[in-house]
Amino acid sequence: MYIISMNTLYYGDNLEILRKYIPDESVDLIYLDPPFNSQRAYNVIFQDKTGKSSSAQIQAFEDTWTWSSETQDAFDEIMQGKYSIELKDMMKAFKEFMGTTN
């Protein structure tokens, strides 16, 4: 993912970039509009010098969701942090609804 802030373009995981480079309480809006849970892997297909499609490609991103160790870490951080009871209750309900395996 890319984040643009103060004429700087960051590339990486949004949460990691926000925590490392963006001051707390300085974000007004985060907008994401990827395909959501399409259960597909999306590839970037390269072209040769003539513009014809090449067999070379790389995986751009995978649009599947799983309860990973990173997900659990984020959940634990919310549960142990100074967040509202309402947020914690919502996250508990989300975890119960989604389950921890796919």
Image: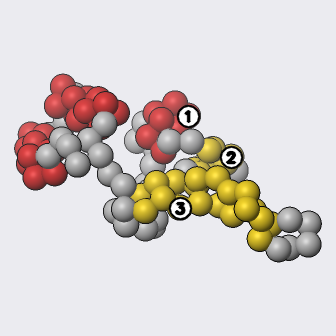
Which residue is depicted at the point 31% across and 31% down?
69
On screen, 2 above or below 70? below
Specify which label sits upstream in the sequence, 1 or 3.
Answer: 1
Which residue is depicted at the point 77% across and 65% down?
54
40 vs 7, left or right, is: left
Label 1: which residue? Answer: 21
Number of the label disc, if any, that sits on residue 42: 3
Look at label 1 and name its amino acid: Tyr
Q: CA distance from mark 1 to mark 3?
A: 28 Å
Q: Residues within 10 Å of mark 3 (few under 14, many from 20)?
A: some
Number of the label disc, if any, that sits on residue 8: 2
82 vs 11, left or right, is: left
Find residue 1 and report its horizontal and vertical position in percent.
55, 51
Residue lying farthest to the front in this orientation? 55
Q: Are marks 2 and 1 in contact (CB under 8 Å)?
A: yes
Q: Secondary structure at mark 3?
A: strand
Find residue 21 and report its horizontal and vertical position in percent.
55, 34
Q: Are marks 3 and 2 in contact (CB under 8 Å)?
A: no
Look at label 2 and name its amino acid: Thr
54 vs 34, left or right, is: right
Q: Say if residue 63 shows up in the picture.
A: yes
Which residue is depicted at the point 8% across and 46% down?
96
Which residue is depicted at the point 82% across and 74% down?
52
Look at label 3 and name its amino acid: Tyr
Specify which label sits upstream in the sequence, 3 or 2.
Answer: 2
